Image: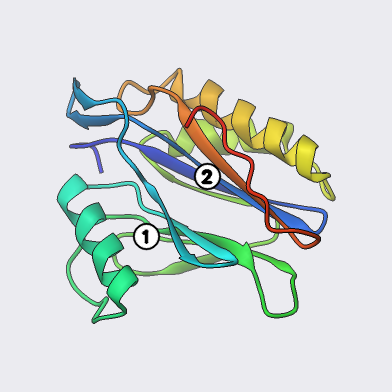
């Protein structure tokens, strides 16, 4: 996780869910790109965030896209955020060996993970409205990546709502 850096966070709000990621791609402390995609659309109601080794991020994104064999030794910590068939918000994260962490509030992954835990515990509240969830997840990610040399260079935020399928995007 330390080689390319990067962070992803997902939060649950009132009838909505959000996922956010930084845009930095690095080779340890050297910034290679400031516009690297880490969040990928899986279905109309589901996004997957993949911080980790850039080659594995792209490989897994392609494999998810083409629905092929997803099991292999990949150095990524996936975050899944979406709305279920019953339109209830769902988030989970996985570690490098695939252990799933289901949560009702927020999940974090990536090199800014420890910082994100602190920010999310401080800012997240139950039943946030979509606009408040957007602001909360944005501030949590931006402030956490300010304290992590391996994450940064802006952010992308997607907020999925039950009522309509518009997605709010920050710093895209």
Q: Which mark is residue 41?
A: none
Residue closest to the eye, 56 or 119: 56
Which residue is drawn at the image coordinates 45% and 44% (left, top)?
8
Q: Residue at x 30, y 37 (%)?
A: 36
On the picture, is 53 further left or further right than 126?
A: left
Q: Are marks 2 and 1 in contact (CB under 8 Å)?
A: no
How many other residues sit within 10 Å of disc 2, few (<14), some (14-19) or many (≥20)? Answer: many
Q: Quadrant of residue 95?
A: bottom left
- The correct choice, above or below, for 42 with respect to 116 in the image is below
Q: Is residue 99 visible?
A: yes
Residue 163 shown left or right of residue 169 in the figure: right
Residue that mark 1 sits on: 95
Relative horizontal placement of residue 21, taking residue 98 as reference (left or right): right
- At mark 1, the secondary structure is loop
Give the total number of marks visible in the rendering: 2
| Picture quadrant of residue 4 | top left
- Please report the residue visible at 54 percent of the width from the left and 31 percent of the height from the top: 141
What scheme was used to colour the molecule?
rainbow
Give the image location of residue 167, x and y in percent: 63, 48
Residue 102 percent location from the top left of the image:
58, 66
Label 1: few (<14), some or many (≥20) within 10 Å? some
Residue 91 in view (yes/no): no
* Residue located at (67% from left, 51% from top): 166
Q: Position of residue 31 (x, y in %)?
A: 21, 22
Does residue 107 lie above or below 102 as drawn?
above
Residue 83 is situated, as x and y percent measured from the top left of the image, at 66, 67
Mark 1 or mark 2, which is nearer the start of the sequence? 2
Task: Give the residue pinned by disc 2.
Answer: 9
Asked if residue 113 is positioned above or below residue 42 in the image, the reply reads: above
- Disc 2 on helix, strand or loop? strand
Q: From mark 2 to mark 1, how far is it between C-alphas?
A: 13 Å
């Amino acid at each position: 996780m330390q080689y390319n850096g990067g962070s992803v966070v997902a939060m649950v709000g009132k009838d909505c869910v959000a996922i956010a990621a930084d845009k930095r791609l690095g080779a340890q402390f050297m910034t290679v790109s400031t516009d690297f995609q880490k969040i990928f659309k899986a279905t109309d109601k589901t996004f997957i965030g993949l911080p980790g080794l850039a080659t594995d991020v792209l490989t897994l994104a392609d494999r998810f896209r083409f629905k092929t064999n997803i099991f292999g030794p990949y150095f990524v910590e996936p975050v899944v955020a979406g709305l279920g068939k019953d339109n209830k918000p769902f988030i989970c994260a996985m570690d490098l060996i695939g252990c799933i962490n289901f949560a009702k509030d927020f999940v974090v992954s990536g090199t800014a993970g420890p910082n994100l835990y602190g920010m999310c515990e401080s800012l997240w509240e139950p039943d946030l409205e979509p606009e408040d969830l957007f602001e909360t997840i944005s501030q949590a990610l931006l402030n956490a990546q300010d304290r992590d040399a391996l994450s940064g260079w802006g952010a992308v935020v997607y907020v999925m709502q039950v009522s309509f399928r518009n997605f709010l995007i920050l710093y895209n």
